[in-house]
Image: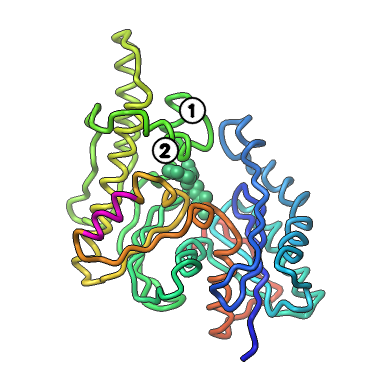
Amino acid sequence: KKDVLILAIETSCDETAAAVVKNGREVLSNTIYTQIKLHTLFGGVVPEIASRKHIEKINIVIETALKEAGVSLEDIDAIAVTYGPGLVGALLVGVAEAKAIAYATKKPLVGVHHIEGHISANYIEHKELEPPFLCMVASGGHSHLVLVKDYGEYEIIGRTRDDAAGEAFDKVARAIGLGYPGGPKIDKLAKEGDKKAIAFPRAKITDAPDDFSFSGLKSAVLNYLNQCQMKGEEVNRADVAASFQQSVTDVLTEHTVGAAKRLGIKKVAIAGGVASNSSLRAQMEEACRKNGLEFYHPSPIFCTDNAAMIGVAGYYEYKKGIRDGWDLNAKPNLKI
Ligand code: KG4
Ligand code: ZN
């Protein structure tokens, strides 16, 4: 049986990434040029700067990915690319690049949903993992509980009503002066704080127990900071970070485990940038163990944006016979 090699491209936000994935599960290369330093100057991702940087770096990132995998373009079976959701100008760079390569080499083109990519990251290091399983996806723009029924077949069980979990991390980080990107900085500072110091809320939505809401939590943190300032009290930033993080961790864990039990699903996975949070990983692991659930999580490098995960999702689409034409376009608001 011949191996299937996918060249994958991901440019939905602020990472210019390319990867070569073999047979959907083996990552031969995973090249990421991160623009974080550039955007840190502005306290967040500046879309126009992101697109310009993608244009500048995309070719060298792809060349590096091919070289590290030890393959040339001729060996590749299909080109997979993220076409949404994400920043439209950033997505366009990857989509145009993928189309150009596919056209020039006469290889098939496969458009990949970014969130489907995040979920598929779990297949890389867990060769035994097969659907069905429940996946909690939390990134900068999304917080979803997704039932993965089969490869490429999903059902949304719950979603955030307002802010995404990663967005809450980024906003709280900015409020306590940690800067962008907030998630990893809060994760680090929280280790020095007391997670029980401040009682921040854990939102529940009465008629939709699987949905999330993080904007109330964010407001509660901002109110707390304002009150401290008014009273002239010094803020213990590590305690704020730890208490906030604990609230997010509790909510994500309880919702995920609760839904898995109700649905009778025995396998639970996590994905997206927030899935690299150390507190969340530890608590999910513990909760799954206590409830007799199998727990899966990607290494941190496969949680945050990367092209390997796009190569994995693209492989399963390719195997199903899914192909895109030259009309493939960037879809910033693509729904799962
Ligand atoms: O998946 P991702 O890299 O990009 C999107 O698709 O949005 O997720 C980025 C998000 C950011 O909000 C970032 O603050 C958060 O993931 N994040 C974390 C951690 N690392 C990244 N949040 C909490 N703890 C972390 N260690
Ligand atoms: Zn992402």
Was residue 91 drawn as part of the magenta stretch in this picture?
A: no
Return the residue at label 2. 187
Magenta stretch, overall SS? helix
Identity, as a three-letter code, of the amino acid under mark 1: Leu
Question: Label 1: which residue?
Answer: 178
Residue positioned 47% across, 34% down in the render? 185
The amino acid at mark 2 is: Asp
**Which quadrant of the figure contains the N terminus?**
bottom right
Q: Badge 2: few (under 14), some or many (20 or more) residues near its Cα, within 10 Å?
A: many
**Residue 59 locus on image (x, y percent):** 78, 58
Q: Earlier in the sequence, mark 2 or mark 1?
A: 1
Q: CA distance from mark 2 to mark 1?
A: 11 Å
The answer to which image quadrant residue 319 occupies is bottom right
Give percent across and percent down for residue 88. Answer: 62, 53
**Nearest to the observer: residue 302 or residue 145:** 302
Residue furthest top as drawn: 232
Tell me if the residue at label 2 has its CB under 8 Å from ligand 1.
yes
Magenta residue span: 282-289
Left or right: 169 in relation to 64: left
In reply to whether residue 287 is colored magenta, the answer given is yes
Q: Position of residue 24 (x, y in %)?
A: 55, 75
Q: Secondary structure at mark 1?
A: loop
The residue sitting at the bottom extreme is 1
